[in-house]
Image (tube, rainbow, N blue to C red):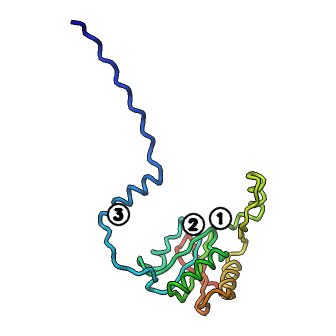
Amino acid sequence: MTVTPDRPKPSAAAEPAPTVTDRFVEANRAYAVTYRDGGMDARPVQKVTVVACMDARLDLFAALGLELGDAHVIRNAGGVVTDDTIRSLTISQRALGTRSIVLIHHTGCGLLALTEDFRRELELEVGQRPQWAVEAFVDLDGDVRQSMQRVRTSPFLLHTDDVRGFVFDVHTGLLREVH
């Protein structure tokens, strides 16, 4: 009888490390185990829309004492009021019943360091000029005022009497109202 040596088993290819998105999907599976549909409507209970910066340091629900279903939250770079923000605010008000708007910028915002040169550099890199503006600013309070003015003068919005703007301090967690 001939004995053959054990052949090495083909090594399994090393599995790639999970991506951030893979971790999100796994976290969602754990969340779904205890999730219960509370029968909430798409209309926010507090009838408010918050427009804020996308900065990951802003936990708006905790900072404002909001619960799931309380408010619409619109986030973008800088929390600026752009045409797309007006689109979302219009849908929020006209289709989903919101009446109040809270605008929140914050200290240490990345848009304070950018200029419209960002668009020109991007155009040189990719060969196409972006259709959007950077909306960078150097004056936080001034940009909050500009955003409030854009909301108040939009012909598409029904409710512009309760529009308030704030600057969130990323070091203290406090809001400071801008008039």
Quickly name the residue at label 2.
Answer: 55
* Disc 2/disc 1 C-alpha distance (Å): 8 Å
* Disc 1/disc 3 C-alpha distance (Å): 32 Å
Disc assigned to residue 174: none
Q: Find numbered disc 3 in the image and state the secondary structure of the residue it sits on.
A: helix
* Disc 3/disc 2 C-alpha distance (Å): 24 Å
* Residue 70 vs residue 5, the one in the foreground: 5
Q: Is residue 147 left or right of residue 25?
A: right
Q: Is residue 113 left or right of residue 99?
A: right
Point 53% across, 77% down: residue: 174
* Badge 2: residue crowd in 10 Å (few <14, some 14–19, many ≥20): some
- In the image, which is nearer the foreground, mark 3 or mark 2? 3
Kindly indicate whether the residue at mark 1 contacts the one at mark 2 (C-beta within 8 angstroms): yes
User: Where is residue 150 drawn, in percent x and y?
Assistant: 69, 83
Q: Residue furthest bottom?
A: 161
* Residue 50 vs residue 159, the one in the foreground: 159
* Total residue callouts: 3
3 or 2: tag closer to the N-terminus? 3
User: Where is residue 52 drawn, in percent x and y?
Assistant: 58, 74
Point 77% across, 53% down: residue: 127
- In the image, which is nearer the foreground, mark 1 or mark 3? 3
Quickly name the residue at label 3.
Answer: 31
Which quadrant: the C terminus? bottom right
Quickly name the residue at label 1.
Answer: 110
> In the rendered structure, which amino acid carries the disc numbered 2?
Asp
1 or 3: tag closer to the N-terminus? 3
> In the rendered structure, which amino acid carries the disc numbered 3?
Tyr
